[in-house]
Amino acid sequence: MIGVGRTKLYELVASGEIEAIKLGKSTRITIASLQKLVMRQREPE
């Protein structure tokens, strides 16, 4: 959805930029956290 690889995704989760939820053995990323990440990246600096 955001065009990043697995390693970068794990970095974003570890840094707290993306929210991850554990469901049993699976780790899921919420759509809302991806949308927030995209909106933060679009904001002018």
Image: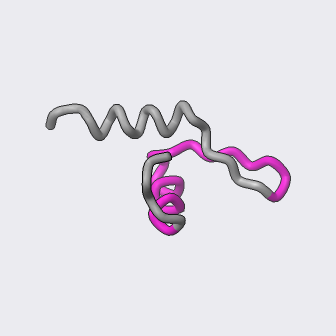
- Numbered circles on residues, count: 0
Q: How is the image coloured?
A: one colour
Q: Is residue 32 above or below residue 4?
A: above
> Does the segment drawn in magenta span residue 9?
yes
Residue 24: give x, y in percent of width and height.
85, 52
Residue 4 located left or right of residue 43 = right
Image quarter hosting the C terminus: top left
Q: Is residue 11 left or right of residue 38?
A: right
Q: Give the percent coordinates (x, y) of residue 31.
A: 57, 35
21 up-or-down from 7: above or below? above
Looking at this view, name the residue that lies furthest to the bottom. Answer: 7
Identity of the residue drawn at 53% across and 61% down: 10
Between 2 and 28, which is closer to the camera in this rendering? 2
Residue shown at 70% from the left, 53% from the top:
27
Q: Position of residue 15 (x, y in %)?
A: 46, 54
- Magenta-drawn stretch contains 26: no
Range shown magenta:
7-25
- The residue at the point 80 percent across, 47 percent down is 23
The furthest residue to the right:
24
- Tell me: residue 3, above or below residue 31: below
The residue located at (61%, 38%) in the rendering is: 30
Q: Is residue 36 left or right of residue 24?
A: left
